[in-house]
Amino acid sequence: SDVGLDIEKGISFREHVSLSVEGLTCTGCETKLYKALHDIRGVSNLHTSLVLSQAEFDLDEQACPVDDLVKAVEKATGFSCQRLSSTGQDLDLIVNADAKAFVERKYPVGIALMSVLGPREIRVTFDPTIIGARAVLEAAFGSELKLSARRTTSDLETGQKHVRRTAWVTLLSAVLTIPVLVLAWAPLDPRPVVYGAVSLALATAVQFLVAGQFYVSALRALIFTRTMEMDLLVVLSTTTAYLCSVVSFAFAVRGRPLPIGEFFETSTLLVTLIMLGRLVSAFARQKAVAAVSVRSLQRQTAVLCDQDGGNSREIDARLLQYGDLFRVDPDSRIVTDGVVVIGATEVDESVVTGEALSIDKRPGSLVVAGSTNGSGVIVVRLTNLPGNNTISTIAAMVDEAKFQKAKTQELVDLIASWFVPVVLVLATATFLVWIAIGIAVRHQGAGTSVVNAITYGVSVLIVSCPCAIGLCVPMVIVVGGGAAAKHGIIVKSATVYENGRKVSHVAFDKTGTLTEGKLQVADEAVLAPDEQLALSVTLGLVDISKHPVSAAITSHMKARGVRAATLTGVRSIAGKGIEGTYNGDPVRCGNSRFLSLEDLPEVQRLLSKGLTVFCVTIKHKPMCVFGLSDRVRPETNLVLAELKNRKIAISLLSGDDAGATESLAAQLGVPLSNVRSRCSPADKQKYLKGLVRGKHDRIVFCGDGTNDAVALAQADIGVHMSTGSEIARTAADVVLLRPSLNGLLVLLDLSHAAMHRVYLNFAWSFVYNLFAILLAAGAFVHARIAPQYAGLGEIVSVLPVILVALQLRF
């Protein structure tokens, strides 16, 4: 939680809240949820996701407690909401008593929260640094509890619940509808009153037991959030068909049957087909989300063992805790992140990083969750629990994009907001036109004309489907995110897909991006009288930094047996260097411009060799000068050649000296007019801002260091190499898990493919609704959609949208 201070209101506690929401079926539902949350005082930074069935936002708990907010949202929308924990670890347990009474007890040390999941099932949120999962299960509550069955992730679990519930309701509707169809269509003896009475009873059951949910949803939307959604069309169409049948049956009972007869089969079959359409749509959407879920890589069990690999036992992976050692057998998946203690093997990390070649692992090597062990047996010391390992981190970054709205989505939301009112107008116009045609052209009676017009109006109401339009963008973003993750690319922003197809310029950082970032000291000059002291002070200054230059100097010093001197006040200056104090004297290191040493003969000598120059001063006098060399990434030339082939301009921005930067630019064929050396973070930002481009052109910046964070945020698409700093990763829109620039080309290709599918889905949605409404309205002389079959519209419209999005996987 963040604590803020307002002089007038006092201290406010702002907490980030995530809700799992059951009941979201279409864009109208998402709009209703968004408005309900948006209208609550204290809510800010609100994001909702139809595909994930989740909402997340910041909440001022003094303005509105979380429990009150959940109740208000459930009342306004009719959805079921459950809060997702954002801190600590969760463990679902079966208790031997009533769950509600159990969670009221005093929490043991390390337990942060307990919530009820069922009559005898609870969820315990605990701090794993204080108490381990096995201790929670076996000892924390004085008696051994049972581990409940494993649940899927919240988005998949919510989807599965919705599919199961929809399936049962659809089955009930079908059971009630089939007898009505038999009585209406089978060649039975004519007993209109008896058959009509049975049909009335069954149709009434369908209307209230099955279609009743649509009434509640539509009324809640109108009253609480003032929106007209898809359920309103369902209510109007099914109610009209049902009431007309009731009126017709009443006339038949009185011995004055109307010429049209009753048509209970229309309302019942209509409701059943609507439910079938929603079932198929929900099932397909849930399967699409599951198919690209990164969390499916998480292994469910672990083999605990001793230091030497003996005394092993298999446990549920949820029961792992800090300090554990686990064994990884040949050809098995690694359960979580850790460090190899015993054994040697090769590990396939392709499913996590996209790196095709297996990587050798020995004692001291890091292994990551989800990767596959080769032929050796290794013992690993756990470093991250399954809920906080590499898979969870990647999945969280992928989910980040699913909560964001692409700019194309703004057009979708605008269309969806007007869709229902427009359809109501069209249905009314259809109804009036067919009354006029019946009376004036066909010379029918008023009653017959009205009932006939109602069938056309009902068909128009129900056959139109905004769900396909609403899913055009989010389904592509979800599937695209999963497809990118399989190539070792994490897309954190939904706008990447739109901007990626319009890229006209790519700017690269040098060290660690175009080059491998594995710098080596190629030359050095010690200018201080005491060489050992100079090197010792230098090591004390650079040892804290993770920058590739500092890391290279540190490795070089330690290889020579140099011991670091103790410095005080050491701090990094982004894009320039590091400064500190040694025995009261100021010590600084960094590039020659930062230290005003460009004219020093030793600096000029190293620059003439095309080396990266690193200088150290004490009391503003030169102490050491190092020249470092780096290797260009093996794929750099091919990637830059392909970008040029696509008519994409290339720039090189570096904080390095001009000699090393221009030497690399010449080697890679980057024009000197697009090269900038000795760049500070502000210089890189200024350069990107000043690039001349057309209205629809987009700029990519690719970097890795903390000093690149500003440029990554400034560019339309910021691409971060995974070997870089955490600050830069946070600022970026895209993270390349595999340290290879080939991921940039894959990203551009994926952007083109994704937006192609978005536009294809838009086209299909437009064509479907246009022709479906025309057919339903009777615009074609010899073809129409009967009202009882109009409910199939959701299947016909939504299924192609999901299938087109799923093509991104292949």
Image (cartoon, grey):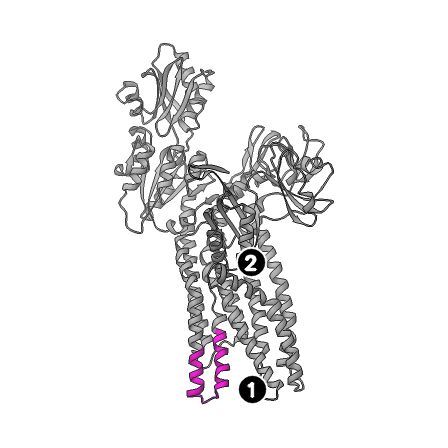
Residue found 48% across the figure and 71% down from its top: 461
Q: Position of residue 236 (x, y in %)?
A: 51, 71
Q: Secondary structure at mark 2?
A: loop
Q: How many marks?
A: 2
Q: Secondary structure at mark 1?
A: loop
Q: For this view, does 43 lie left or right of residue 96? A: left
The crowd level at tag 2 (other Cα within 10 Å; few <14, some 14-19, many 20+) is: some
Could you say which is closer to the camera, residue 152 or residue 252? Answer: 252
- Discs 1, 2 touching: Cβ within 8 Å: no
Outermost residue to the front: 8
Q: Is residue 441 magenta?
A: yes
Magenta span main SS:
helix
* Residue 344 placement: quadrant: top right
Of the residues shown, which amino acid type is indicated by label 1?
A: Leu
| Residue 60 in view, yes or no | yes
Residue found 31% across the figure and 49% down from its top: 697
Q: Position of residue 602 (x, y in %)?
A: 30, 19
Mark 1 or mark 2, earlier in chain: 2
Look at the image and give the residue range highlighted in magenta: 431-459
* Residue 162 placement: quadrant: bottom right
Task: Look at the picture and state if 269 lies above or below 109.
Answer: below
Q: Position of residue 71 (x, y in %)?
A: 56, 52
Q: Which residue is mark 1?
A: 258
Q: Position of residue 441 (x, y in %)?
A: 42, 87
Q: Which mark is residue 78?
A: 2
